[in-house]
């Protein structure tokens, strides 16, 4: 992703600190990370974000996100 | 050479869990396959209608193809998310909620592990998590050990199915304790699905002969030399064990009994 | 829910005995059924292509309907006459000749019994009769015990198949000695068909998992509470055990191995 | 069967002595006993009689016959 | 013909529980004997040094001879009171306190039963009671099921010995799950005494071969046709299994190996 | 801690073979020990009164110390020469005659081997040799397989003892087929000594519990990590199994039965 | 035991109501019931009475006693 | 052993050809081979030689001897 942009913020995604553009919604974040909404479940600061709220929930400095999906398992 | 669907359907009642009915008594895991194509072929060959999946972080640096949903046609197979890898009720509840939030199902295969080397359940954490998740409206299928008392408490907690192990996860040791499994089945009203430990077809067959309602397996198929052929074997073995249980076996005798007439011999 | 014929055919090679091939690896006896209709339905459900019959005197005072041929469609099932009830090579040879003179087959299921209480074979008489009958052009399928040495001598004598017992005839004790059966199979070139002792589906399944070529059974089906359903179970179990053998089972481990990924857990 | 006929002979059939009319062939005997040829194998004095010979082989005083067929067996 | 005490002593280390050492690895129950004399003779023949007793009301209307203490020489045998019949942690603690108040010992065989039909332990109540009694200074020997996780928690709670069952109390089904018992022994530091389910001598022998520290039994001796002779058998079997475990058994092989030289044969 | 000789003697009758009586029910082989001292110590620890030896050529180029007689005190142990390594009746008879000509005994452990890989007996050759040697006045102890019919013929031939195998020589697989061994014992009058296959103490114990008269073993002791300790274990296990058989075990039950009183509980 | 004594009190012993003389100690009670002190453990109103206190602890109207001992058990 | 002696004969002992002095008895042969009589059984030309005959039975050119004893075996 483009880190040259002066106006970025630091967030934690799946345990790693990442710089992302300022002012994103969760919906924007997934697009930014090139992830399909349907395939991912989002936890923001330990709270699950419902899919219908992706457009309304913002991404702020210091937020911690967990982006999970289903993998093969028994 | 093979058996018609109607014949088999007529020979057994469907499996019912949480108000849904299934013709197959097998539930398959989707882990540990050498590739996704083999997984899909094996699942298809097994005839299962429910497959388990795990909840894990998206790998931001790898292709998004890794998600198992890209390979599983949800028209064919219902998803059963699990809480594998959780060592506390709290973690298991969190993973269950994430699994439900994916929007496919409110069913959860609940695992609360007590020990990394054996993956045996922590029945205390298991009961806590089961009670909480039932309150939250989940349909809980609870992986547990062979203890009748815990099984009874899980039923009291309102789980949709109790899933005692045959032997440790991934061990392939088969049904170590038929007595306990039979005992659990004889005392519970909810479905009893034996989960983990089956190693080969006869393990599945003898497990079903104990009268249980179904079997959940993963490694026995995924780690066979030929997973697709083994999936077919498991499907047949599970049906065979179920039918034999329903048919009522002949008595065992410590002496021989002729199968041809003893009269009408020549001089 | 069920498996297509082509799928199964593709998953296994046919059984070949004396130059004939069969898709089913089950041979059924026709004795001890409560009535002929049940017998025919059970045989049909089992998918077998060969059924054994005994040679006995016509009962001059009873209806001629008693003959089993009135009930067995020879388009569907090949007959395999047996020498059940014979306690000497001489008697067995006589019954074999009578069986062949009926004009249906030159195959014979050879039994030379050594003891009335156990119906165990007299291997000395068995070998004499086998050699004589092979000389006379019979295709001999020899019922024997679990002894490898006798099995090797029967092969040398030119029998078409060696048929060691799982446990005594009609006992339903299942496969008492898998080691010996595996040993016999590993050393012989002719087909090994396990004959007698199977009691329920898992017995058939575990027997086939030893790598043998087929199973012959009678009482396990005829004396089940529901013979037709048990016949279906035996058909599935025999296929399952065969496929599992071919598929190559996972290794047994005395420790657990997770079926879900251990990485990608949440913080 | 009719034993009033003066010209009968005694033969052993399946272990029992029976009076049968004089001059029968094996073919006649089976008919006399109401047995289908196809279903029965005949042993006369310990020798199997081939089906094609039924018409040619006679039934004589003192002959011992075994008439066998297939029954259910394992 | 028999083995000297010194020979045996030299062949094994003593069993140590809560700082006391014992030469016998057998603990015997005192229930269900047809009369007290048989009980005393059987206990003597077994060589045990510890016997369990139950806490019950005095029967005010019967002879005071019923008390078991009238028959047990406390110079010979240490008493181990149990909490048999208790279905809650609270009851078990009460019985334990009464047992200690008798003034003979602060040891307690802790049972918290979860189900009347199977007498299986309620592990939740068991852990509560164990923690409380350890706090009160009891030496707790805890009867539990085959679950490793519970066994580990009991050890953490500070019990003096963990006592998993071989099979249900009084069932005589023997060691149903050697794997779990071996697993528990491999992970615990406190003594593991297998309690309940042993039915005959070979059950005791194979149990000791798993490496456990001892066995507690009652019915197998009391309900044998000849309890005194069976007690002797159990003593020998327990020693035999222990010694075999220490001696290190030969490897299993699926082929034969001559025990006589293959060279030096004649022409 | 240990059992007095008189106690044990009072608990069992002596073993009688060919008119001689023995207090020990163990017969030991003398092969495969790492050194002669270990062999002598193990034999001593086992309490056996009879040891088997093989007949082989003197090695003209090695020290004469190799002869086993230099190490075996014949006051303590009776010799039982064997015909190990013989593949025909003729060879076995020749070795038997050489063994007798040594001047120590007219007893012979008769082996006629049918296959090098399994060392299973050739029952045809075995019966021929047994009949011939009995005619020549030998006391024949015949190593055979698990076949009842052969065992009955050996008894008819006049052997002094029938010695069916537990599993192949040197395999350590234990008692593979208790049913057949029990069957043989139930039908024979001559002593039945189980020969070969025992791997550890519980194998010996469970074998004796079938009611047989004794056990012959070699590798299980010689190839244990600690042969002397294992010899002690085998001695105890053999006595234990015998006593348990005589004592009459408790019945197996699929439910629990309390060992403490259910009455007299507190309010 | 003697119930004719006018001055008795009712106590519960092992679940049964019994009349016992007034003014007994636990020590007296055991003697009264012909029980050996050494063999019995006494619970009074759910509290264990230590053996050394038997002489000092009284038996009063309505007291509930549990008198227990060891019996054969597994 | 001493093979320089001109008057030796060839015999087979335990499958090997050996030169031994002429005119020996079996007794002499065992001594020659340094074997204890008590420990060895002798077969001469497939016939067992009884111990009491060792002194009387000769060793001749071409004789085949088997000298056997007991070794450890199961």
Image: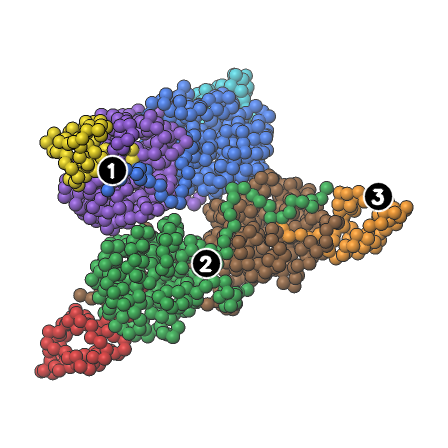
Chain colours: A red, B green, C brown, D orange, E purple, F blue, G yellow, H cyan
What residue is at 36 percent from the left and 23 percent from the top?
A: F7
* CA neighbours of label 2 inside 10 A, class few (<14), some (14 to 19), many (20+): many
Residue with the mark numbered 3 = D10
| Left or right side of E159 for H36 | right
Q: Residue at x 60, y 53 (%)?
A: C33
Mark 3–mark 1 distance (CA, rounded to whole Å)? 93 Å
Task: Pick the quarter of the image with the N terminus of chain G.
Answer: top left
**Marking on residue G16:** 1
Determine the chain carrying the residue at label 2.
B
The image's mark for residue C120 is none
Which subunit holds the residue at mark 1? G
- Residue H60 location (% of width, % of height): 55, 23
In the image, residue G11 sits, relative to residue B84, either above or below, namely above
Image side of residue B43 versus residue E139, left or right: right
**Residue receiving disc 2:** B242
Q: Is residue A20 above or below residue B130?
A: below
Closer to the eye: label 3 or 1: 1
What is the chain identity of the residue bearing mark 3? Answer: D
Label 1, secondary structure: give it: strand
Q: Position of residue E145 (x, y in %)?
A: 29, 47
């Amino acid at each position: 992703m483009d880190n040259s942009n002066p106006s970025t913020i630091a967030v934690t995604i799946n345990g790693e600190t990442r710089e992302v553009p300022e002012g994103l919604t969760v919906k924007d974040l997934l697009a930014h990370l090139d992830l399909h909404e349907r395939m991912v479940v989002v936890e923001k600061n330990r709270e699950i974000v419902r899919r219908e709220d992706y457009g309304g929930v913002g991404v702020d400095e210091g937020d911690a996100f967990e982006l999970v999906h289903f993998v093969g398992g028994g | 050479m093979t058996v018609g669907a109607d014949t088999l359907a007529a020979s057994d009642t469907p499996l019912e869990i949480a108000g849904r009915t299934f013709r197959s008594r097998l539930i398959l895991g989707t882990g540990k396959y050498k590739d996704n194509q083999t997984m899909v072929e094996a699942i298809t060959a097994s005839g299962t209608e429910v497959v388990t999946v795990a909840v894990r972080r998206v790998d931001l640096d790898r292709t998004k193809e890794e998600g198992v949903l890209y390979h599983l046609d949800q028209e064919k197979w219902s998803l059963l998310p699990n809480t594998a890898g959780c060592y506390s009720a709290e973690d298991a509840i969190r993973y269950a909620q994430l699994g439900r939030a994916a929007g496919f199902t409110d069913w959860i295969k609940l695992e609360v592990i007590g020990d990394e080397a054996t993956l045996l359940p922590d029945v205390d954490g298991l009961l806590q998590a089961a009670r909480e998740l039932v309150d939250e409206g989940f349909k809980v299928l609870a992986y547990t050990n062979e203890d009748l008392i815990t099984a009874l408490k899980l039923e009291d907690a309102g789980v949709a199915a109790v899933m005692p192990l045959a032997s440790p996860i991934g061990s392939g040791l088969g049904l170590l304790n038929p007595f306990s499994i039979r005992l659990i089945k004889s005392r519970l009203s909810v479905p009893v699905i034996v989960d983990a430990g089956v190693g080969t077809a006869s393990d599945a067959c003898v497990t079903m002969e104990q009268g249980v309602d179904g079997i959940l397996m993963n490694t026995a198929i995924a780690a066979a030399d030929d997973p697709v052929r083994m999936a077919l074997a498991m499907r047949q073995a599970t049906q065979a064990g179920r039918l034999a249980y329903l048919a009522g076996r002949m008595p065992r005798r410590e002496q021989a009994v002729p199968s041809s007439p003893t009269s009408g011999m020549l001089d």
